[in-house]
Image: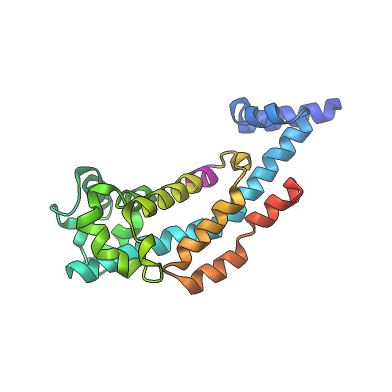
Amino acid sequence: MSSIEDEIFSDIQRSISRHRLAPYRMKQPTKKDAVALYLWNMALCGSLYPLLHCTEVALRNAIHDALYDVTGNRRWFDDESLLWPNERNRILEAEVLLKDTKEQNFAGRVVAEVAFGYWTGLFSIVYERTILQPIMPLVFWRAPKRERCQSALSARVQRIRDLRNRAFHHEPIWKAKDLRQQHAAIVELLDRYKRALSRRVSQMAGAPEEYHVMRGA
């Protein structure tokens, strides 16, 4: 590597941090290749954004709409008997931030404000009878009955959340050997409640193609 390239790499490393580049340095023999791997990982993360974004937004809205249908209350999240303390506290935190929001827009703003981890938390076993059993036929209306079980759905949404967090925080997702399978599983789950959306988004999300190029598939 030339002195100029060394200087460029040093600038990159200072900006990104030595710690963040370490996994890429361990995998690649040269500094130049390590930076290339880092940039490839950026492309992978970016190509997943449309699919992960739409899955998150569509899922939370589907859950909200189903709970509104089941309870008859658009502000179902204010029912203290429905939520456990962890989820209830997240709602209270969101409501404090949105205290000046007009009432007609309040429920929708709260739904958008709470993090994805709140919604995946509703797939916990503690909500199996109170929330999941009533809403699963409404949310996952296209899914076979055998797929509408708490344990299977919880595992699927938690894995999506893990990938979402890693991609959105630019973690090294290139390490995942089953990234194509994870991509397909997300499209399949989205298809269970929003078929038209899943088809459009899967056409935009280029993660499998990006993955093939570098893996030589």
- For the image, the number of numbered tags is 0
Decide if residue 73 is on the left or right side of residue 195: left
- x, y percentage for residue 8? 76, 32
Which residue is at the far right? 2
Q: Image quarter for residue 12?
A: top right
Q: Quadrant of the N terminus?
A: top right
Rendered image coloring scheme: rainbow
Q: Residue at x 58, y 53 (%)?
A: 181
Which residue is painted at 32% across and 49% down in the image? 118
Q: Which residue occupies the foreground of this view, 24 or 160?
A: 160
Q: Quadrant of residue 75?
A: bottom left
Measured as percent of width and height from the top left, residue 193 is found at: 41, 68
Residue range in magenta is 165-169
- Visible residue check, residue 121: yes
Q: Residue furthest left?
A: 81
User: Percent x, y for residue 189?
Assistant: 46, 61
Q: Residue at x 36, y 47 (%)?
A: 117
Viewer-proximal residue among 113 and 165? 165
Question: Does residue 30 show up magenta in the picture?
Answer: no
For residue 101, say whether it is visible: no
Tell me residue 114's x, y (percent).
Answer: 33, 52
Locate residue 15 relative to residue 87 in the image: left or right: right
Task: Out of 155 and 61, give the one closest to the viewer.
Answer: 155
Name the outermost residue toward the bottom.
Answer: 196
Residue 187 sits above or below residue 121 on the image? below
Magenta stretch mostly in which secondary structure?
helix
Whether 167 is among the magenta residues is yes
The residue at the point 61 percent across, 53 percent down is 180
